[in-house]
Image: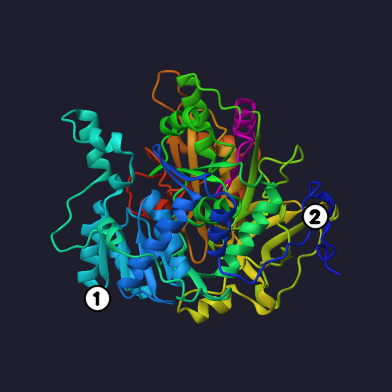
Amino acid sequence: MTALASRPWLAHYPEGVPAQVEIPAEPHGRALVDAARRWPERVALDFFGATLTYAELADRVSRAAGAFYGLGVRGGDRVALVLPNCTSHAVAFHALQRLGAVVVECNPTYTASELAHQLRDSGATVALVWDKAVPAALAARENLGSEVRVLALDMTRDLPLKLRLALRLPVAKARDLRTAMQGPVPAGVPRWHELVARADALDPSVPEPEADDVALIQYTGGTTGTPKGAVLTHRNLVANGIQGQAWAQFREGEETVYGALPFFHAFGLTFCLTLAVRIGATVVAFPKFDAASTVEAHARRPATFIPGVAPMFDRIVTAAETAGVDLHGIRLSFAGAMPIPAETAARWEAATGGLLIEGYGLTETSPVALGNPCSADRRPGALGLPFPSTDIRVIDPDHPDELQDAEPDADGTVRGELLIHGPQVFQGYWNRPEETAEQLLEGGWLRTGDIVRVGTDGVAVLVDRIKEMIVSGGFKIYPSQVEEHLRAMPGVRDVAVVGLPGKGADERVAAAIVLEDDDDSRPLVDLAGLRAWGEQKLTRYALPRVLGVVAELPRSQLGKVLRRTVREDLLGREDLEQLAQ
């Protein structure tokens, strides 16, 4: 028996959280039908104060599904959504789910070439596009030479009437908001709101999709190369919603969820578009994260649950302190994408009186697979315990093909690559059978590419990503461990550690640092000083040999440092401070 075969984590589940959950064989869209029946008058969506009840949302979704059907969209067809968070994004997503079409979520800030890749790769035939992204979508279509039908969506049509009228005022604030939300659309591009207004509700005889039909192609971040489309079925989406509901023990028909994470990302999509409907929550949608807007909304419609990433929580507390807004009432918050510093967790919990729970997942797990207990037993900085109906293994990363379980240390801790098995695990990568075979192993085990250590209590802690590991002198160096120590050095505000080419197959440890704000008291930070600081806790082979000062670290929209971009930037610079090889 392996060290984890006995599922030691089950003994540490909070009271009321089941070891297994039942996943009904139904399409995801069934949850909206149920919500409209159970909570018809409850507000489902709030966008700057413009609201839709669940009954109204169901009606709007049916008309939107009718509009797509009238355009020729049928089950299995891929439709790209190139939209910020807004009411129409949620409506279109649910409408396509009802039709059995496959949603392809795209970042609305993508360039024409980035969009062209996803449109080509997915085979999308229709793209519903935010006004400001229409030029990029049209350019992508031209580059492809395809027949993708581009539909334009004016996000301001989702605003309350009072705010829409205010946008016409000849004042700077209104002008700035118009510029941020609208853009010119060439003649001949169909307008989404007009199409929906003319459409009939979808004929009920149009068949629903099956549970194992593809619901979503969600592209991974592409931090290690060209983005790949993760294929998720209706069963995957239903499973992760039920798992999340069981883990957090949400109160059905009572929660208010803040949708500041982008819906086009798996984290925001699950908590704000799929799980929220399942529990009858009110979703307050924001087109982008802005701490001041979040605090203003809390004063108007208080949140009870906020999913986010570490920097968001600090910024919300700061904005609330500035505005004099009380954040109490936010009962629960989930943090993902990066570790939560203990100081951030303590500050948030003091300000809200609720819990900040760290979790872990991948696009390939719909996305959540592990989480800290929603109780006083949570551990900031840890990934947590496997979700209900989820199993994990830890294998020897040096021999992944043999699937050999890692041997426990003397204290029972297991360290190696994390594998995940559960009903939320994806079906593979769209049209990439070889890469699917590398990632999805026999028996449905998913290779995560993450190195973890798991204690005898089943709690997993992230060490680093295999593909970001640096090898120098035959030694393995985990960047996050080096960063954690260097970040504490006086004068250093932030740091990213990457490997640069060295002699032969060796790599040189390189640090890109962001300095604290300029002032006379800031200590000098140079390579010698950085190495001296590092020697306090780091082995000699892990000390940086290359130093580059940067204004900011490149991050994804969820706040993850893009180490691949850092590496490319450092390779292109001639002003680096470095030791001779």
Q: Is residue 54 above or below residue 119?
A: above
Observer able to see residue 230: no
Q: Nearer the viewer, residue 416 or 252?
A: 252
Please give the range of residues in magenta.
329-352
Residue 368 in the image: state x and y as whole percent.
61, 56
Check the picture and name the quadrant holding the N terminus: bottom right
Circle number at residue 147: 1
Q: Amino acid at mark 2?
A: Trp
The answer to which image quadrant residue 144 occupies is bottom left
Circle number at residue 9: 2
Report crowding for label 2: few under 14, some 14 to 19, many 20 or more residues within 10 A (C-alpha): many
Q: Secondary structure at mark 1?
A: loop
Residue 455 in the image: state x and y as whole percent.
79, 52
Of mark 2 and mark 1, the one earlier in the sequence is 2
Q: Is residue 453 left or right of residue 408?
A: left
Report crowding for label 1: few under 14, some 14 to 19, many 20 or more residues within 10 A (C-alpha): few
The answer to which image quadrant residue 168 occupies is top left
Q: Is residue 364 above or below residue 441?
A: above
Q: Is residue 344 magenta?
A: yes
Q: Is residue 467 above or below residue 319?
A: below
Q: Secondary structure at mark 2?
A: helix
Q: Nearer the viewer, residue 44 or 187?
A: 44
